[in-house]
């Protein structure tokens, strides 16, 4: 392809050949040769980086536009000697960042697990205290309501037994607020039995069964008693003997209610930790005075022959008729 020559005599109204060549070079991939001002095909210019600049007096330039102005070809240095600019991170930097991030995650996880462990321990301890308080209150309420009648002592026995299978059984007049009172209605006088039994999970628990006086124990009360306390390690009782003035571990006079009784309940805060135990002891004063037969069924005073009851009528009288004098 033949290139058209460029006008050699620049004038005031005609663009100079050198500037015209520079303008063409900016638009088209041609280069201007200095001797004859002819356009020669040239490869696409590449950006020049880190090229040392020389003075214009030496005939060199810095940019392609300046080179075209002076009528010289652009010299592109080899890219192999240009240092490449780094982007991203090295492998060591990535490993250090991952190690720091892992340390931060481990610290956060350790703090969170410590908080959860402390919260569970506090809730378990609070639940154990609440269970022990309820159990002690239930035993105290039932003991202070104990009853005994001399005329029917065979129904009001006070039986206590210590040991691994400890139990306590007596008759009490229970209030309406006592647990499971709604089931028995107006039958307030019931035999109360606290016993230490084995739970399905292998632990020991203190249960309560109630039976109305002169009635038999039903199946529901036998199979589903009230669980007073769980994880019980010990349930022991002591009784005050007024004749010996000391505490006894066994109560032999079953037809009489003791005046003072002491019981100890030891509970485990954690069933898997045998060392974590809570022990509660109470001394209860019981109504030891039994109901006398005359208080239970008062008898009418005997009427003398020919006499009358106070405020009553004489024998054989007619209401509304004044007896003859």
Image (cartoon, rainbow, N blue to C red):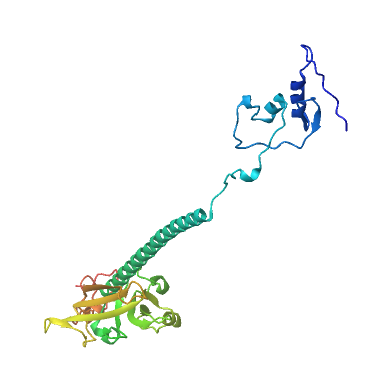
Q: Can you name the residue that lies furthest to the right here? A: 1
The x, y position of residue 320, in whole percent, is: 29, 68
Q: Quadrant of residue 189?
A: bottom left
* Identity of the residue drawn at 48% across and 54% down: 97
**Vertical position of residue 111 compared to residue 287: above or below:** above
**Quarter holding the N terminus?**
top right
* Identity of the residue drawn at 21% across and 77% down: 261
Looking at this view, is 135 or 204 the one in front?
204
The x, y position of residue 319, in whole percent, is: 29, 71
**Quarter holding the C terminus?**
bottom left
**Vertical position of residue 194 compared to residue 37: above or below:** below
**Vertical position of residue 93 compared to residue 83: above or below:** below
The x, y position of residue 191, in whole percent, is: 33, 80
Q: Quadrant of residue 103?
A: bottom left
* Identity of the residue drawn at 69% across and 28% down: 67
The x, y position of residue 104, in whole percent, is: 44, 56
Number of residue marks: 0
Would residue 163 appear left or right of 98 to someone viewing this image?
left
- Asked if one can make out residue 163 in the rendered structure from this viewpoint, the answer is yes
């Amino acid at each position: 392809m033949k290139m058209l020559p460029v006008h050699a005599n620049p004038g005031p109204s005609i663009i100079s050949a050198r500037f015209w060549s520079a303008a063409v070079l900016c638009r088209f991939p041609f280069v201007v040769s200095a001797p004859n001002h002819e356009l020669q095909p040239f490869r696409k210019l590449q950006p020049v980086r880190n090229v040392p600049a020389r003075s214009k007096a030496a005939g060199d330039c810095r940019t392609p536009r300046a080179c075209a102005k002076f009528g010289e070809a652009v010299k592109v240095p080899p890219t192999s000697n240009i240092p490449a600019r780094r982007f991203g991170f090295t492998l060591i930097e990535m490993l250090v960042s991952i190690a720091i991030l892992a340390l931060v995650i481990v610290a956060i996880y350790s703090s969170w697990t410590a908080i959860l462990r402390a919260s569970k321990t506090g809730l378990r301890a609070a639940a154990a205290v609440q269970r022990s308080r309820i159990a002690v209150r239930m035993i105290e309420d039932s003991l202070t309501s104990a009853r005994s009648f001399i005329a029917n002592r065979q129904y009001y026995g006070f039986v206590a037994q210590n040991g691994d299978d400890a139990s306590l059984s007596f008759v009490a007049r229970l209030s309406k607020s006592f647990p499971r009172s709604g089931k028995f209605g107006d039958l307030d006088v019931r035999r109360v039995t606290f016993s230490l039994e084995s739970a399905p999970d292998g632990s020991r628990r203190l249960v309560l069964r109630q039976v109305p006086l002169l009635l038999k124990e039903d199946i529901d009360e036998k199979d589903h008693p009230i669980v007073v306390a769980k994880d019980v390690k010990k349930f022991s009782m002591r009784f005050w003997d007024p004749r010996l003035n000391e505490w006894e571990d066994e109560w032999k006079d079953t037809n009489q209610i003791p005046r003072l009784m002491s019981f100890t309940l030891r509970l485990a805060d954690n069933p898997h930790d045998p060392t974590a135990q809570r022990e509660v002891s109470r001394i209860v004063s019981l109504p030891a005075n039994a109901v006398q037969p005359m208080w239970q069924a008062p008898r009418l005073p005997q009427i003398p022959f020919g006499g009358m009851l106070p405020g009553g009528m004489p024998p054989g009288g007619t209401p509304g008729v004044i007896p003859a004098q």
